[in-house]
Amino acid sequence: MSVVCGRAQTLRDPDQAHARAFFEDNFKPERLAGDGLLTAYFAPEYEARSVPDEDFFAPVRPRPADMVFKDGQVKMISPDGTLIPYPDRGAIEARPSGDAVAWMRPEDLFFLQVQGSGVLTFEDGHREKVLYAGNNGLPFVGIAAPMRRLGLLPENGTSGDAIHSWLAAHRGPEAEAVMQLNPRYAFFRTVPDDGTPPLGAAGLPLPTGRAVAVDPKHHGYGALIWIDADTPNLPGAFPVYRRLVAALDTGGAIKGEIRADLYLGQGAMAGLEAGRVRHSLRMHRLVPQP
């Protein structure tokens, strides 16, 4: 691999033809067995407030001081000093929120927690990046399937946009009960918005349409992967995603070898597209030539 990296460093702003030739000359595709699932994610942009009001009352919480990591697990320091499992979403939301770094609409905060990072615009016009700072260690549970089972949304109507709209229309105890089906709760920190792309788990900026979140048990960060995804099961989706991507991120719902989450950029349009991606996936790993 070091030889191929050395060759890559000699390239200077290659056009599409030269870039393609480089990959074809230096790598060979290796098909991974089986079919899986492609989804997509984005960096959302949401309104926020510095103080709560009747619409913006969900606190964006920083990582709590009572959270510790022990033997690879997230624990809470109890009042008597012992370590116990960290509480779920419902219990965390019942806590006081005097340390909130911002206030959001509850359905927006829920989606921010699913996506992992984003940009907030405050009432005075200034913008801040909101960055992932940890979670309570409980498993991620998607709410699309239970919403279908409960008859809240139709079988093929659980796009991200449809779920967000339902939560907004049923804001209050009804929406809270649905969101609490996902026990995982994410915490955040804020920094000034510098206009640069968000960083993935690999510590590198995420290029729009060319980065995927993967299961690190099966793929190393930086791995080059050819994705071939079709047969969408949500209406309004693009029919095919077929391209070369790099494994630069991970996520709580991304489990298994033939599983990828495609980063589609920042803002509302990226979110609209990302919420419709649920495609049958085949993957090839690019292996360096000897």
Image: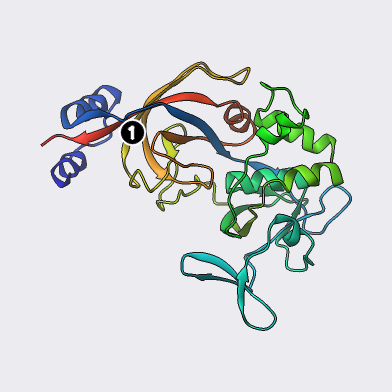
Q: Nearer the viewer, residue 7 or 113?
A: 113
Tell me if residue 182 comes above or below residue 69 in the rendering: above
Residue 100 quadrant: bottom right
- Residue farthest to the front, as pictured: 149
Q: Is residue 180 above or below residue 79?
A: above
Q: What is the quadrant of residue 178 in the picture?
A: top right
Which sits in the foreground, 25 or 187? 187
Identity of the residue furthest to the right in this view = 54
Q: Residue at x 73, y 51 (%)?
A: 122
Residue visible at 48% across and 30% down in the picture: 38
Horizontal side, residue 168 vs residue 222: left or right: right
The image shows residue 5 at horizontal and vertical percentages of: 19, 43
Q: Quadrant where the C terminus lies?
A: top left
Give residue 56's position: percent from left, percent from top. Answer: 81, 50
Residue 172 appearing in the image: no
Q: Residue at x 46, y 48 (%)?
A: 200
Specify the amino acid type for callout 1: Ile
Residue topped by disc 1 = 225
Judge from the rendering whether residue 228 lies leftward or rightward of residue 130; answer left or right. left
